[in-house]
Amino acid sequence: MRTAVNTPLPPIDAPLEWATLSNGTFYTAVIGTRPDGTMDTGDIRSQTKYTLDNLKLCIEAAGGTMDDVAQVLVYLTARADAKGMNEVYAQYFKKPYPNRATVVISELLVPGCIVEMVAYAHIGSSKG
């Protein structure tokens, strides 16, 4: 059974949730939305910070922490942005890092968005 996580992020005008839980597994897809609901259209470091802040808000709302994140899928619209994204990303996770894939795509759905992250975590389960 899937349940929506009640996050502090602004409502979405689309048929989706910021985050869901199902049998102890946390699912989210986040972008650099500001607290007021507008999209940050700054550089990769700025958008990555907002994106990871939003991931942190979502996982904490589900009762977890960033240490619970097991896998992250990163979507970038420019290969050159990988270095800046990694610099910010490393500030949010510690070793052992979550498993990760990074993919460069032509564009994201939200205008001005240059990074999106999908994350999976296990909430309340034993480690390892």
Image (cartoon, rainbow, N blue to C red):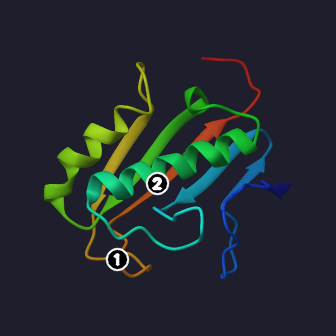
Mark 2, Cα crowd under 10 Å, few <14 / some 14-19 / many 20+, is many
Quarter that holds the C terminus: top right
Q: Which residue is mark 1?
A: 112
Cα distance in 3D space between marks 1 and 2: 13 Å
Picture coordinates of residue 114, whole percent (x, y): 32, 67
Task: Identify the secondary structure beneath mark 2.
Answer: helix
Picture coordinates of residue 49, whole percent (x, y): 40, 49
Picture coordinates of residue 79, whole percent (x, y): 16, 59
Quarter that holds the N terminus: bottom right
Number of marks drawn: 2
73 versus 109 height, above or below? above
Picture coordinates of residue 108, whole percent (x, y): 38, 75
Mark 1, Cα crowd under 10 Å, few <14 / some 14-19 / many 20+, is some
Between 39 and 81, the residue placed more toward the observer is 39
| Residue 16 lies in quadrant | bottom right
Q: Which residue is mark 2?
A: 51
Amino acid type at mark 1: Gly
| Residue 125 lies in quadrant | top right
Callout 1–callout 2 Cβ contact below 8 Å? no
